[in-house]
Image: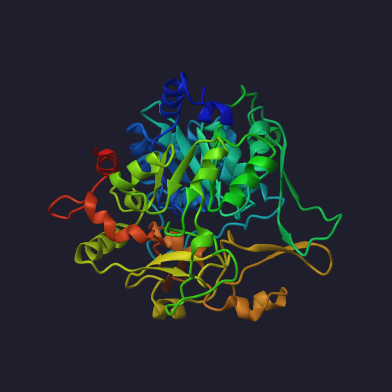
Amino acid sequence: MPPQSAQDLTSRGAGEEKVEARVTASYPLIIQGGMGAGVSNWCLARAVSRLGQLGVVSGTALDHIFARRLQDGDPGGHMRRGLDHLPFPEMAERIWRAYYIPGGKPGNASYKTLPLQTKDGPREMRELCIAANFVEVFLAREGHDNPVGINYLEKIQTPHLASLYGAMLAGVGYVLMGAGIPLKIPAVLDRFSNHETATYPLHVAGAQEGDDTTMTFVPREYMERDLPPLARPRFLVIVSSNTLATTMLRKANGSVDGLVIEGWTAGGHNAPPRGKLQLDEKGEAIYGERDKVDLEKIRELGLPFWLAGGYGSSEKLREAVAAGATGVQVGTAFAFCAESGLRDDYKQALIQKAIRGEVRVSTDSQASPTSFPFKVAHLEGSLSENEVYLARPRICDLGYLREAYRTAEGAIDYRCPAEPVSVYVSKGGKPETTREKKCLCNALLATVGLPQVRTGKYTEAGLVTSGNDLAGITRFLPPDGSGYNAADVIAKLLDG
């Protein structure tokens, strides 16, 4: 078992070597980051975990990703294979009949529009979440006995309960969560391990005392037969400050098993700078000394921790371990390897830009509907280019980044700054909040080759997110610059 207390991790003297050996043997040295929607797919996570490190699938938008894979004809039959192992065969058959298209939909046809996730359902989407998360983890675990993790964004709350239950049904070994303060997740994992009812608080803007803002999931309403208890996965929280790390350990309603300390150079959403937001001449958020994490204080918390954001090299791995970290989390290097879900044309275009020294990654303070800074890799033809963004109709039909809010009548409704401005304002939103907001939901699905086609005329453009170390992926390339795989990344990181 891993050490569970600060004393286990910090004791010195005669037992020091035994303690250090136990930490190393019990936890991975390298965590492959859970990136984007479908970039960290089951294929990538399986490749990493088979090599003895922690492969992680992204749990973001898995319900839509799974449904679109089925509508594309389930190339390779992988989704069907996973569904065949779901312990609820009637649910599996309902989903198969609803979404599978033999041979795949025509290229100019639209994907099916699915109901949006809400506080209380609908059941169709909850079943889809259970199945999609189960299948992704199941496939990542095939062919080896090593743990697999899944990454969620706390801010995308409505799918949490059904998604976690589906992942646990498949035996997920780690749950990683950032983009918020997931104080209530540990108890959910505890409850689901015995198939017990779990609840989770939904953040509702303007909620008043007495409002029902609690989401509830009852596993036995979905179970088709009794099942043995499920293994409780380890829970790792992704944090960017000492304050958040301390808060998680003091106030979480169950065990937190480790921390991922992520800096602002990492890809995806970044934590806003502490204090008043200031922008440089390029319009990017300015980070300073206040945003640096005090690793000595992190060590004092007594939990395993990994450093993330610019740690994709053997030198940085050694530096992290020397600072007391258990290891590192690496995203960008894995995002551009052969097994990732990133579209090949985007992948190859950015690899060639890196070879030529032309890549540019910026921290866009306006792009995300969440208002969190968001890393964008600039690429012609993608939504990072202003003319592509301006040509896109404002549509919000996936809804993962919507904000729940209290209506004047006391009900719960949802709004998104990336939806049509008039619609957003009619829901009480401020028009200035909509400025330059991009539909990340549709863009990120397009980035992994699942773009929505609208009326046969407009096809959604992708948007590639990457850490600042994008130029550094050339270290993993062979001399001909043709590409690399997950094993190449791990070998380079472990070099020396």
| Residue closest to the eye, 249 or 42 | 249
The residue at the point 47 percent across, 22 percent down is: 13
| Residue closest to the eye, 463 or 376 | 376
| Residue closest to the eye, 470 or 350 | 470
Q: Is residue 240 visible?
A: yes
Question: Does residue 211 lie above or below 200 as drawn?
Answer: below
| Residue closest to the eye, 132 or 32 | 32
Question: Does residue 229 lie above or below 102 as drawn?
Answer: above
Residue 280 drawn at (x, y percent): 46, 76
Q: Is residue 4 visible?
A: no
Question: Does residue 110 lie above or below 218 as drawn?
Answer: below
Query: How many numbered circles does the render carry?
Result: 0
Q: Within the image, what quadrant is residue 494 found in?
A: top left
Question: Does residue 75 lie above or below 345 as drawn?
Answer: above
Farthest residue to the front: give it.
13
Residue 383 drawn at (x, y percent): 41, 71
Position of 51 with respect to 417 (left or right) is left
The residue at the point 38 percent across, 76 percent down is: 385
Farthest residue to the top: give it.
14
Colour treatment of the image: rainbow
Residue 41 drawn at (x, y percent): 41, 46
Residue 332 drawn at (x, y percent): 36, 53
Q: Could you tell me which quadrant the C terminus lies in? A: top left
Position of 137 with respect to 47 (left or right) is right
